[in-house]
Amino acid sequence: MITQPATRAADAELVSASWTDPEAFAELFDRYSGMLYRYVVKRLGPEPAEDLVGETFLVAFSRRRSYDTGYSDARPWLFGILTKLISRHHRSEAARYRAMRRAPLDGDVESPADRVAAGVSAQAARPELAAALAKLPAKDRDVLLLIAWGDLTYDEVARALDIPIGTVRSRLNRGRRKVRAALGDTNPMIEEE
Amino acid sequence: MDDLKLLRDFGRELEQEPPATLVRQRRRYMGTAPRRRGRAGWAMMGAVAVATALAVAVPTLLLSNRDRALPMGSGDRPVNVSGVRNILLIGSDTREGPGNEDYGPREARQGSKARADTIALVHLPADRGKPTVVSVPRDSLVQIAACEGSPARRDMINAAYTTGGVECLVKTLEKLTGVRVDHYAEVDFSGFKKVVDALGGVEVTIKQPIEDPKAKLSLPGGRSTLDGEKALGYFRLRHTGDGSDVQRIKRQQSLLYAMLAKAKTALVTNPAGFREFLGAVTAATTTDLNVEEMYQLATSLRKSKPVFVTVPWAPAPDDPNRLVWKQPEAKELFAKLR
């Protein structure tokens, strides 16, 4: 989903260029504002999304001198900032998922496990998914959604949240286990990866 | 069952494309970009006070998405199509707001009107080249325009503000200078205190100890950290040094420069504190500029180093405590701002 053509300058070069020429930072905005928007709109809806994207770049710009240019890709850095900003909205985020949980279902009401097992779409499983996300501890949710919705790798999540990769794995596993349980998977012995 | 796949699908359902307005956020961070400091520029600056207020107020207004526009003057003014913009900046000592009532002489405290403590005119040329910030000494003896029932008279320029507020000051300045004033921004005292406190105080270095009951200020010589209250006293300090308004302007500039430096540090080291600071600035500023105009102004001020000047002046022949504008220099200066 996120592609980086080889021809353009690495993000790290833009960040270091912006130390002396603030204009260079605008290029980072052009590259990633849409991506960050699409991510935050999933978690918090359109209302605060625009502002949070702007704020992410505001914070990033103010910290541009402490950017580790050893990392050419700035996405994890930006996602890390955005995640911190999102955490201020964790109440409204949970409330949003709870509202989706209450959304009416179409079709016959079966047990969630049956629906999922029958390969029904996420739309059908939406109330369970939303309920699971609403209940997840914020730290587990951050990891799970950076991977599922932000398309970051484990390494990138570790860098974004400044936590060891082992912690990424354990939080992800815990999050996924709870999501599966909510979807009606009653077998706790199944552990993927 | 792949829970991650289901989650991804769920995410896709929730996904929305960014609106076109997202691009407005593009330049937001630029509003806080430290302006490059030209040595000569800062050394000679006339009205960093107000420039500072603008530099911080602009991103704040953009951040808060709040349009504090107040309709200015009568609607019969023709639209300015020249592209030139002149913005009047006023540091006011209104005592009307909460927290303002302890300042100034008693008569000023009791039901009197605001006085303009700091006056400056920001000029943006039509080509958005180098802006000019002209500091107007408040002690300037000038011909005040007739407004709000007060007849035209010769008085200190800030009397225009006391008599008829922003509109009267604008009218007076326009008559005196031939420069059209397009917008204004006001910062008041209690707001100023809050701004300093939000910054966690500001440091100044002074040569001589200061004892000034009028400004409610007592400071040892050397380096001191001033809280909002003390910083305001220092800002208003008058009866020290040679007691002139020009020396006071210099003190104000150094104080505001220290604030600006502190704000920049706060932005980098303490983003939460910086937000508080920006909030205080927003609350302290009243302006008729709308967000788009603020935005343009911020961009212009950031891109080029403003030239800071003070209206050429000389001591008033009939009153050594007042000053008059030196002609033809003042006229020549304002002619460039039209």
Image (cartoon, coloured by chain):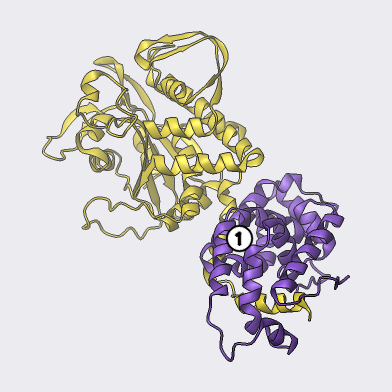
Chain colours: A purple, B yellow
Residue drawn at x 74%, y 73% as measured from the top left: A180
Q: Residue at x 36, y 44 (%)?
A: B286
Circle 1 packing at 10 Å, graded few (<14), some (14-19), many (20+), is many
Can residue A45 be seen here? Answer: no
Closest to the observer: B291 or A171?
A: A171
Determine the residue positioned at 38% across, 31% down.
B190
For disc 1, the chain is A
Q: Position of residue B310 (x, y in %)?
A: 42, 31
In this view, the residue farthest toward the right is A193
From this view, report whether residue A131 is shown above or below residue B104: below
- Which percent across, then down, holds residue A3? 78, 73
Quadrant of the image containing the N terminus of chain B: bottom right
Q: Nearer the viewer, residue B33 or B64?
A: B64
Image quadrant in which you'd find residue B137: top left
Identify which residue is drawn at 19% across, 34% down.
Answer: B163
Q: Is residue B254 above or below residue B281?
A: above
The spot of residue B276 in percent (x, y) is: 52, 41
Left or right: B90 as drawn, with respect to B294:
left
Q: Is residue A20 visible?
A: yes
Residue A109 position (above or below residue B304): below
Q: Which quadrant holds residue A151?
A: bottom right
Q: Nearer the viewer, residue B295 or A101?
A: A101
Residue B178: quadrant of the picture: top left
For disc 1, the marked residue is A53
Number of numbered discs on residues: 1
Q: Secondary structure at mark 1?
A: helix
Is A127 placed above or below B192 here? below
Amino acid type of the residue that numbered disc 1 sits on in the rendered structure: Val
Q: Position of residue B24 (x, y in %)?
A: 53, 62
